[in-house]
Amino acid sequence: MPVGVLIVDDQAAFRDVARMVVEMADGFTVVGEACGGADGVDAAARLTPELVLMDMNMPDLDGFEATRRIRAACPATRVLMLSTHDPADFRPRALAAGALDFLAKSAFDPFVLEDAWAAA
């Protein structure tokens, strides 16, 4: 049974890239997309994905707070935060919010996704 993935990002172009990465990875499938943090929290509750790919910066609700809310409502759901910012600057904050890890969007590929899930 594939790992269900929810993609949460306010940029449609990155959601498209993330969808391609997920589809290329073995054992993963996209179950939904959301264009903001609040929508992501609602979608996670509705879809109960095993994994959420969460952007850090979004206009309505940032990825840190969205991650906190998702993890509180759906403790079995894992969140992997992605951003254009340097992971070293934000990983501790992401981990404190309950994220599995914080990765650079530029480094996100099927192997990174598979490795992050295996580490979960």
Image (cartoon, rainbow, N blue to C red):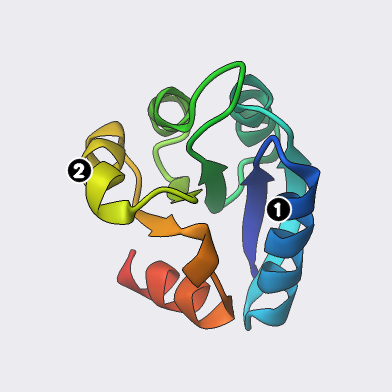
> Can residue 63 be seen in the rendering of this structure?
yes
Expressed as whole percent of the image width and height from the top left, the position of residue 26 reads: 63, 83
Expressed as whole percent of the image width and height from the top left, the position of residue 106 reads: 53, 66
Identify whether 45 is placed above or below 103: above
Asked where in the image residue 35 lies, by quadrant, the reply is top right
Q: Residue at x 20, y 43 (%)?
A: 92
Q: Residue at x 47, y 45 (%)?
A: 77
Expressed as whole percent of the image width and height from the top left, the position of residue 99 reads: 35, 44
Q: Quadrant of the C terminus?
A: bottom left
Residue at numbered disc 1: 14
Residue at the far top in the pictured view? 60
Residue at numbered disc 2: 92
Q: Which mark is residue 103?
A: none
Tag 1: residue type?
Phe
> Can residue 1 be seen in the rendering of this structure?
no
Q: What's the distance in space between the residues labelled 2 and 1, CA to CA?
A: 24 Å
Tag 2: residue type?
Pro
Identify whether 10 is placed above or below 32: above
**For marks 2 and 1 on the same chain, the one whose residue lies earlier in the sequence:** 1
